[in-house]
Image: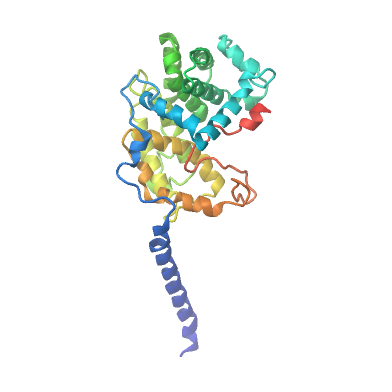
Amino acid sequence: MNPEDFPVRKLSYFFLLFSIIYFLQNNLFAQTRLLPDPSATLTERFGKVPAPGVHPRVLIGPDELMRRRQLMQSTEVGKYTLGKLEGFLVSIHAPGKPLTETYAGLTRGDLNAAANLKDAWLQSKLPLVLLLESYDAILHEDQARGRLAAEAVTTYASIPRNWWENDSELMYLALAYDFDYSYMTDAQRRTVRQTIASGTAGKKPDGWDMPSDFRLSNWQPRGAALMLSALAIEGEEGYDTSIYPETQQVMKDFLHYGISPSGGGLEEIHYFNYGMGTGALALIAMSRHGDDLVTEPNYRAVPNWLIASMEPFDDAFSMHMDTPNDQGGGGCQLCVDEVALVE
């Protein structure tokens, strides 16, 4: 054998070995996913979006509330989630907690209540608090709390600000409107609806101006907050009909190009979860519209990656010295930061 051929031969062996490994990974291991292949009825679990003007509608409908209440009271996951939710809300109901007086001010119509809260981080959490209070009120069919939440949501929506600057905060306000709609007066609905429209109409989802295979970043699913906000007023005055199909295409591309066939996010786990904390909610909303992006093969394989990336410390992930973020992926992060708010 010519010695000069040896490096070439070694390189050929390498590519042969690489091809075998690639074949096994995509044809053997891909068949042992934690989640089975989806059936045609998968999206039925998320329900169907009701007619325009019927609320709640974005993530759950009126006809599903009874079952949701039962699940929250009778299953371990439901009871755990309800406990986290109500633990969060101690921050506005217990005397002396950081947001108790601020929330009371909002329920009285005080437009300065938020500004009087000097902690900027806590200020940014007010829309999340309004969302969770509205959700808890409708779960418990508590009309008194629902009406107080309606006052608070309307007051917060009336504070002058540029709602284009933060999609997440607007999304929380919009979902609060969606959950609290039945407890609102027509005047309150009109005020909040106008605020949602002002922050969504004419706006494009993150990544819309990129080629399809460039939509790889956590900012694309995170940007789906724009669509969730818009869907809270779907079919109502100020609704931008272009936002839903544009966001759907961005999300479809992200699930295909931003996740490998074996289920690994192309960004490390913190950034993937940061985006999908919102993106997972968007997938639920899309499924309710009959668009089953949850069946995308790469996305279905994500649990394999998440399980393989866990450390043996409860629910912690390997972060490689980055900021931990255990929410997102296949779920939502509506209850994030509850400890910091309550303590």
Which quadrant of the rendered structure holds the C terminus? top right
Q: Position of residue 237 (x, y in %)?
A: 35, 17
Snapshot quadrant of residue 183: top left
Q: Which residue is depicted at the point 51% across and 23% down?
A: 136
Query: In the figure, 189 relative to 304: above or below?
Result: above
Q: Where is residue 30 in the image (x, y as percent from the top left)?
A: 41, 58
Query: In the figure, 222 relative to 153: above or below?
Result: below
Q: Position of residue 145 (x, y in %)?
A: 52, 15
Q: Which residue is depicted at the point 57% across and 51% down?
A: 310
**Residue 137 appearing in the image:** yes
Q: Which of 181 and 42 is in front in this view?
A: 42
Q: Position of residue 216 (x, y in %)?
A: 45, 47
| Colour scheme of the rendered structure | rainbow
**Residue 334 appearing in the image:** no
Q: Which residue is depicted at the point 55% across and 53% down?
A: 309
Q: In this view, does 134 lie to the left or right of 121?
A: left
Number of numbered discs: 0
